[in-house]
Image (tube, helix red, strand yellow):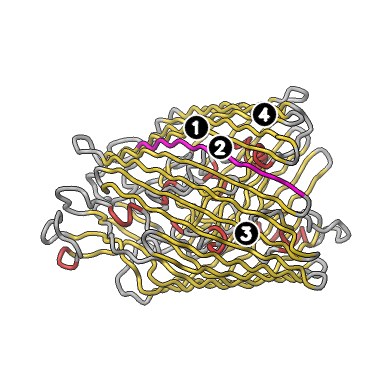
Amino acid sequence: MRTSSIIGLICCLLSLSAKAQETLLDTIVVSASLRNQLEKETGRNILTIKGSDFQKFPVNTLDDLLKYLPGIEVQQRGPQGAQADIIIRGGTFQQVLVLIDGVRLNDPLTGHFSAYIPIHPSEIDRIEILKGAAAALHGSDAIGGVIHVITKTFSNATQAKKHTASAGVETGQYGLFNVNGWWRKKMEKTSISIGFFSNKADGQSLRGTTGFFHSSAATVSLRQDLGRDWSVALRSAIDNRDFNAQNFYTTFISDTAREEVRSWWHQGQLRKKGKGYQWVTDIAYKKLSDEYLFRPGTTPNQNHTRLFVAQSYAQLQAGAKTTLTTGVQFIGKSIRSNDRGNHTLPHAAIFATLNHRILNQLFINESLRLDWDGNYGTVLVPQVNIAWSPSRFTFRGSWGTGIRDADFTERYNNYNKTRVTSGSIGNPDLRTERSQNYEIGADYRLLKGLKISAGLFQRAQRDLIDWTPTTYANMPRQTNLVPGGMYALATNLSSVSTRGAEIDLQWRKPMKQGEFIWMSGWLWLRSSSADQTPSFYISSHARFLLTNSISITKEQFTLSVNTLNKVRNVMQSSALNASISRTYMLANLRLQYRIPKSGVSVFGQCYNLLNQRYSDLLGAQMPGRWLSGGLNYNR
């Protein structure tokens, strides 16, 4: 930790000594409130990443990229998209909402699948990461934060060329072979893109098996301008993940699990732009099939879920300094499972956001959402964000409430089996999580492309859902359980308080024949609960997190480094001879050379340079040092 801190401090001092007369970075436009708005006007801590950054850093998948961004903790169970939990500000992984072009992606089965984003990285225009509560606008799950993936086709991103394409191949140790391709054509009124990727490896040795994975996806997107300010955008994608899942969900030595998750994603958007208004309608449908085999010879869990989302909203210029965004949303969820049973769940909401500009540099954003859900009934969710942005500074504050309903795994896991000797047991009687969220902070835009953000936040939660050790005698339902057994029961914790402080740094500086990118984050967290019984996910999030991502491009060469330091609670499993260490450090390295006038780049990459032995979750062993290399083509 000391080395990374010193490097970060040196770089910070160097940045502060640069020329102060450079242009301020105050023109970043984000869509955190479903409308385009300057970042400094939102009153929120928002991190924006360009899609083009993906090829610059030593990462292979989107969850790899998120893991090294400021203030985001990604708890990976397996490498390169096998499975990862996204955590923002110490919430559980179900408390982060993932959006694709404004539409929720989170599967009703479990938040473990939230990082399965079926988009080729070259199709991504930008990723906006909103830290803190946003349930008043986006609804359930948006408690810790929101990951919003915005694509080139749906945003109608401009490009210099009518045709763009990229392709890549990578090979390395342990049978690694990755291949991908993407093509986009943009005409006057039509834009189309097609992409695919496949990441495959035999994997490093585990207990009696190997950490194999094969993740693949294919997607096609189309946008058509219809005239008279109307446009339509469509997308279809298929995503398949087949991987070793040993000890992903249990700490049993008999666990030699394998899991395959297949999903289909279809999305459509109709947009109308007029003078002083914009109207958007989104429809999306997701079908997911999950097969989990605990060990050979056992009956696999087979889960089939459906997610339907329909929403329509309008943005209106309500006055010279006021805009109104208002709309309706419907969500339908269903599951058919030999393990969790068959269930359906409807959900509906109406919402509105007012954005005011008062005086010259004072901005107030008020949001109100009325939610109705088949489980928890009717709930009113308010939020207020304030920003004051004089000169280089932006001072911001936010207050809002949050809600999250249990997913089908938390309610019904192991509920439909004849006999369960141990493991996690769902609870149909779970109450909905409620939270109060507070934050204050400031952003300082010192130089062109340089922003430093700092803030304090608190989340006071009641009825938080987590897994707690429970004896057979205390189980609310004992029908298929074994007397004397010990189980992990999905439980509502009476109250949990999470406090934290964060410092983020983002610096993007063009250089002569090159570019310098630096993103760094410091995060301190403390969670406490009134309940004496230990809970799983609350005790596993990081207490301190330091991330650095640095990329230097000079002429044909690019050198990039990712580092991560994490401090968390110690955990032990004597049965597995596994442990969670108090701290660990990761470092990834990538060196790339672009062959002049060819569009081809040659690269070498080292993941886990220090050969650190570590797990993010107890028993799910992550790989040691892994060398690879390959070619990229961009036109």
Amino acid type assigned to the residue bearing label 1 in the image? Ala
Q: In which quadrant of the rendered image does the N terminus lie? A: bottom right
Which segment is the magenta one?
260-274
Is 486 on the left or on the right of 430, as rendered?
left
Q: Which residue is mark 4?
A: 184
Q: Mark 2 or mark 1: name the one nearer the start of the chain.
A: 2
**Whether residue 630 is visible:** yes
**Mark 1 or mark 3, whichever is nearer to me:** 3
Q: Which mark is residue 326?
A: 3
Q: Which residue is mark 2?
A: 119
Q: Which residue is mark 1?
A: 217
Q: Residue furthest right?
A: 21
User: What x and y, as percent, mark residue 516?
Assistant: 74, 46
User: What x and y, as percent, mark residue 556?
Assistant: 75, 32
Distance in Å between CA atoms under marks 4 and 3: 33 Å
Distance in Å between CA atoms under marks 2 and 3: 28 Å
In reply to whether residue 316 is colored magenta, the answer given is: no
User: Is 165 located above or below residue 10 in the figure?
Assistant: above
At mark 3, the secondary structure is strand
Distance in Å between CA atoms under marks 2 and 4: 13 Å
**Residue 467 figure quarter:** bottom left
Amino acid type assigned to the residue bearing label 2 in the image? Ile
Q: Mark 4 or mark 1: name the one nearer the start of the chain.
A: 4
Q: Mark 2 or mark 4: name the one nearer the start of the chain.
A: 2
Q: Mark 4 or mark 3: name the one nearer the start of the chain.
A: 4
Q: Main secondary structure of the magenta part?
A: strand
Is 71 on the left or on the right of 621, as rendered?
right
Q: In which quadrant of the rendered image does the C terminus lie? A: top right
Amino acid type assigned to the residue bearing label 3 in the image? Thr
